[in-house]
Amino acid sequence: MPNPWWRVDLLQPYSIVSVTITNMGDCCGERIKGAQIRIGNSLGNNGITNPLCSEIHSLGQGATQTFHCPQKMLGRYVTVYIPRTEYLHLCEVEVNALVPDH
């Protein structure tokens, strides 16, 4: 599949500090290598042009890792995107954000 992506809509912008991802555990864990975590408020191009939080250089099969953004990132959409032809498999994604002030 060319340029696969997964996205969550948080329904409002949050200050996101990190994203924790659990890779699939039954097979093909290497497929996630090179995936990008993008955060922002745009749905343009399926959100893959939003600012980059982090890139997944390696994540073992069935492993869980927290990817920290270089600074707090304000965004409603969190997108995991692989910029090549590949299959995207995710077991779990957790968005770690600061509670908004009201």
Image: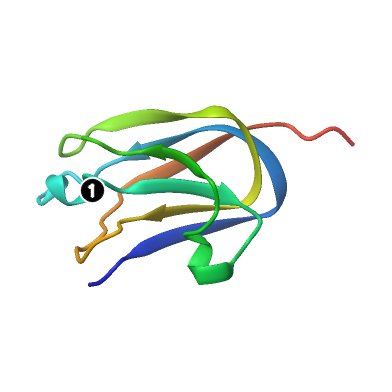
Please give the residue where the numbered disc 1 appears in the rendered image. Answer: 32
Q: Position of residue 40 (x, y in %)?
A: 61, 51
In which quadrant will I find the C terminus?
A: top right
- How many numbered markers are drawn? 1
Q: Position of residue 58 (x, y in %)?
A: 21, 35
Whether residue 69 is situated above or below residue 28 in the rendered picture: above
The amino acid at mark 1 is Ile
Q: Residue at x 55, y 54 (%)?
A: 50
| Type of colouring | rainbow
Local secondary structure at mark 1: helix
Label 1: few (<14), some or many (≥20) within 10 Å?
Answer: many
Q: Quadrant of residue 44?
A: bottom right
In which quadrant will I find the N terminus?
A: bottom left
Which residue in the rendered view is the most extreme toward the left?
A: 27
**For residue 82, side relative to residue 68 (left or right):** left
Q: Residue at x 41, y 31 (%)?
A: 67
Identify which residue, 23 or 81, lies in the foreground.
Answer: 81
**For residue 9, side relative to residue 45 (left or right):** right
Whether residue 89 is situated above or below residue 59 in the rendered picture: below
Q: Position of residue 84 (x, y in %)?
A: 24, 62
Whether residue 27 is situated above or below residue 7 in the rendered picture: above
Q: Position of residue 99 (x, y in %)?
A: 73, 32
Q: Residue at x 39, y 28 (%)?
A: 66
